[in-house]
Image: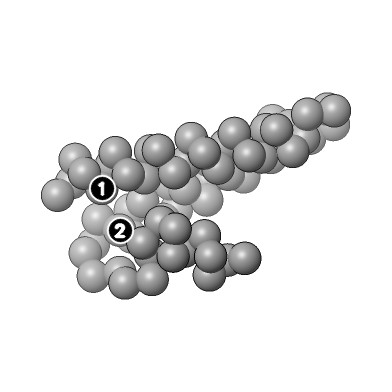
Amino acid sequence: MIMFVANAFGLDRIQRKSDWVTIPFVFSIGIFGQNMGRGTDHYWWWTIGSVAIAALGTFSIRRILR
């Protein structure tokens, strides 16, 4: 599962320093989303939504830093 996510983000070939900025950003948003959804009925929706937002943020940041 982790390798699938890494391939989806294109993190399997990390060459630029900007990629090392985006990786903690993605995981921090995912953890934040899980903490927001904890204790509610919409836990999985919070997790999926946070991952989707992290993916969009990663692509936009990588495009800006290019």
Instruction: Tell whether 32 sits left or right of 27.
Output: right
Numbered circle sitting on residue 19:
2
**The residue tagged with tag 2: helix, strand or loop?**
helix
Q: Is residue 45 above or below residue 23?
A: above
Instruction: Tell whether 13 sits left or right of 37.
Output: left
Image location of residue 45, percent across then percent down: 70, 33
Which quadrant holds residue 19?
Answer: bottom left
Tell me which label, 1 or 2, sits earlier in the chain.
2
Image location of residue 24, percent across then percent down: 44, 53
Q: Residue at x 57, y 36 (%)?
A: 50
Q: How many numbered marks does the figure carry?
A: 2
Q: Is residue 64 above or below residue 24?
A: above
Instruction: Tell whether 55 sits left or right of 66.
Output: right
Neighbourhood count class around disc 1 (C-alpha, 10 Å): few under 14, some 14–19, many 20 upward: some
**The residue tagged with tag 1: helix, strand or loop?**
helix
Render colour scheme = one colour
Is there CB contact under 8 Å for labels 1 and 2? Answer: yes
Image location of residue 35, percent across then percent down: 70, 37
Q: Residue at x 14, y 49 (%)?
A: 66
Instruction: Tell whether 4 sits left or right of 17.
Output: right
Q: Amino acid at mark 2?
A: Asp
Image location of residue 14, percent across then percent down: 30, 69
Res 42 visible:
yes
Q: Amino acid at mark 1?
A: Arg
| Residue position marked by numbered label 1 in the rendering | 62
The residue most toward the left is 66
